[in-house]
Amino acid sequence: MIDGPYLEFEKPIMELQKKISDMKEFSRVEDIELDSEIKSMEGKLKKMQDSIFAKLTRWQRVQLARHPKRPYTLDYIDLITTDFVELHGDRCFADDNAMVGGFAKLDGRPVLILGQQKGRNTKSKLYRNFGMANPEGYRKALRLMQMASKFNRPIIILIDTPGAFPGIGAEERGQAESIARNLREMTNLEVPIIITIIGEGASGGALGIGLGDRVFMLENSWYSVISPEGCAAILWRDAAKAPDAAEALKLTAPDVDKLDLIDGIIPEPECGAHMDPSLAAEKLKKQILIALDELDPMTPEELILHRIEKYRKMGVYTT
Amino acid sequence: MDWFRKSKDGLVSQQKKEIPDGLWTKCKGCGEVIYSKILEEQLWVCPNCNYHFRINATKIISLLLDDGQLETYDDNLSSLDPLSFRDSKKYTDRIKASQQKTGMKDGLISGLGTIDGLPVSFAVMDFAFMGGSMGSVVGEKIARTIERAIEREIPLVIVSCSGGARMQEGILSLMQMAKTSALLAVLAKKKMPYISILTNPTTAGVMASYASLGDIIIAEPKALLGFAGPRVIQQTIGQDLPEGFQSSEFFMEHGFLDVISERKDLRRNLSLCLQYTYDKPVNG
Ligand SMILES: [Zn+2]
C-alpha cells in the first residue's frame, strides 16, 4: 500500500490495490477461495505499475503538471531570486491574486518576475482563483512589464494556469481584449522576455503572458490550445475523454519542442519537480541565466525584430 | 494571382438559382417563416425581428467591397495535419469535407480591394469551414493580409466569424494568435488603420487576438462575442447567465465596441471609418 499523498496517475494503482485488498477481505470473511482471481489481479497490478513508470503517457504528464505538491510561481521566485518586492494592481479595477509579479534580484541582477499563482489548500486555492486570472490580472502583468521595459529590466515569466477565468465579470471587463492587447504590446517591449511553462499552459490564458524572446518548458509541463478536458468536452462530447484528448493534442514538452515552437526543455528531478523543488529551481535558474546572457547584447530594436520573426514563422501549411 | 469577381447583381442572380421558388426559411430569431427571396433582398436580415442570419464570406465581399470585387491572394494555402489529429473523425477527413462543402481550401478569403475607392487589405472568415476556426492556414493568411497592409501602406479590414482557435492543430493554432497580434504591432507603428468587423459568432482565440485589436471595432447586432463560451461559463460558475450576456449590445455596454451596425449600414459605416482614419496618397 502506498500511504500519504500520491501522484494522480497512481490512482488506478491505488484503486486496484483497494480491489485486491477488498477481495482478500471478502474471501476471508465469506470463506470463499479466490486465490486465482487475486493472483491474476496482482499480476495486473504489477503490469500496470510497470507500464506507467516505464513510459509516462501524455495524460500522466498532465497530471504531474497538476501535482498538488508541485512548486508554484511564488515557490520558484523564492528559490531563484532574492529581495522580491511584490507589486500589486492594474491601476484600473483590482488586484488579481491569480497573477503575481514584482521586482527581484536574480544572481544580484534586477529583473521583473511574474506569473500565475495557484493555491495549495482550499482557502488559498480560492484566494488564487485556482490560478485563473481575470482581465485585471493580464492588465496588471502588462503594467508591470511596460514598467520593466521603461526602466530597462529584463522580464522573467513563469506560466502555470488551467486557463483564463471563464466568468461573467471576466467577460464584462474584457477577458479577450486584455489577452489580445498583451500579445500586441508584449511585441513592443524593449527588454529581453524569458518565459517558462512551469506547470499548466492552457490556451489564451497562458499565452496572454506568453509572448517573448525565449520560451522554455519544464519537462513535465504541458502547453496547449485548450485543456484536455475542454477539448474532450467539445470533440468527444465527454470531458472524461480528457486522456484521449491529451494524446491527440500533443501537448507535452517533447511534443511542443518537436514542433519547433519552444527554445528548449528544462529537465526536472527524477519523478518530477515536486520531488526536489530546490533542484528543479536550480535547473530553471541556470537556463534563465543562459538565455539572459544570450539576449543581453541585443538592442531593443533587434529584440523586437527577432521577436516578431520568431512568431512570424510559426505555422504548418502547404501552398 | 487569382481574381475573384462577382458583381452584386451577379451574386444575387446566382443565389436565386440556388433557392428554388417557394422555398421558405425559418427565422432563428423570431421563429417566423419567411420567403427566402424576401430574406435575400433584405441582405439576410429578418424583416420581422431584425435577426441577422449568418452569411458566407462571398456574400460579405459582395456586400462591402466596390463592385463586390476582391483580388484574392493565397487561395491555395491548405492545412496539413502536423499532429495527425484524430477524434471521432480524422482531421484530414474533416478538412476534405469542409473543402467539398465550401469550395474553399480553408476558412478565410483574403486579398486586395477598394471601398468607395479607398484601397484596403481585406480578409473575411467563413464559419461554414470548421466553424471558422483558426489553424495555421487562417493565421498565415491573416498574417499575410496584415503584411500587405504594411507593405502597401493601406488600411486593413478583417471580418471575423469564428469559434476560436482550431483544436485539431493544437498548440500551432494557439501560436497564430501571437503571430497575428505581433504583426498588428507593426501595422500600428506604421499608423495604418485597422477596422475589425465582428459577426456572429466571434469568440475565444480569434476574439483574444486580432478581432479585439482594431483601431475601430464594429459588430453586427446581437452577435455572440466573448472569450469563453457561454456553456463553459455556466458550468464554471454554476448559475444562469444574464439575458443578453456576451451579445454585441453587452460588449458595447461594457466599452469594448465602437459601433453596432446593421448589415444594411455596414458598408457605409466601414467606408466612413476608413475615410476618417486614412488619407489616400495623392499619387496613389
Ligand atoms: Zn425574425
Image (cartoon, coloured by chain):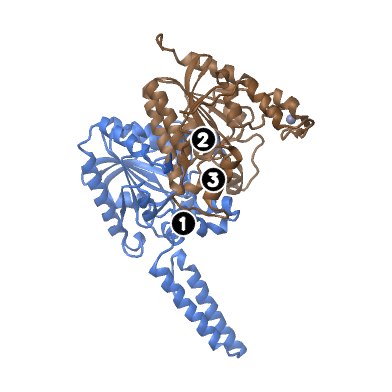
Chain colours: A blue, B brown
Mark 3, Cα crowd under 10 Å, few <14 / some 14-19 / many 20+, is: many
Q: Which quarter of the image is occupied by the C terminus of chain B?
A: top left
Q: Are marks 3 and 1 on the same chain?
A: no
Q: Which mark is residue B207?
A: 2
Give the structural element (helix, strand or loop) at label 2. helix
Q: Position of residue A5 (x, y in %)?
A: 44, 67
Residue B23 in the image: state x and y as whole percent.
77, 33
Nearer mark to the viewer, of 3 and 1? 3
* Residue found at the very far top of the displayed protein: B282
Q: Chain of mark 2?
A: B
State the mark number for residue B95: 3
Residue receiving disc 1 = A121
- The reply to whether callout 2 and callout 3 are in contact (CB within 8 Å) is no
Look at discs 2 and 1 and give the one toward the viewer.
2
Residue A89 shows up from this direction: no
Residue type at the position of mark 1: Asn
Counting residues from the start of the chain, the first of labels 2 and 3 encountered is 3
How far from the left and from the top, in percent, is residue A296?
Answer: 21, 38
Residue B34 location, quadrant: top right
The Cα–Cα distance between marks 2 and 3, rounded to whole angstroms, is: 23 Å
Helix, strand or loop at mark 1 = loop
Q: Residue at x 42, y 24 (%)?
A: B149
Left or right: where A84 falls relative to B85: left
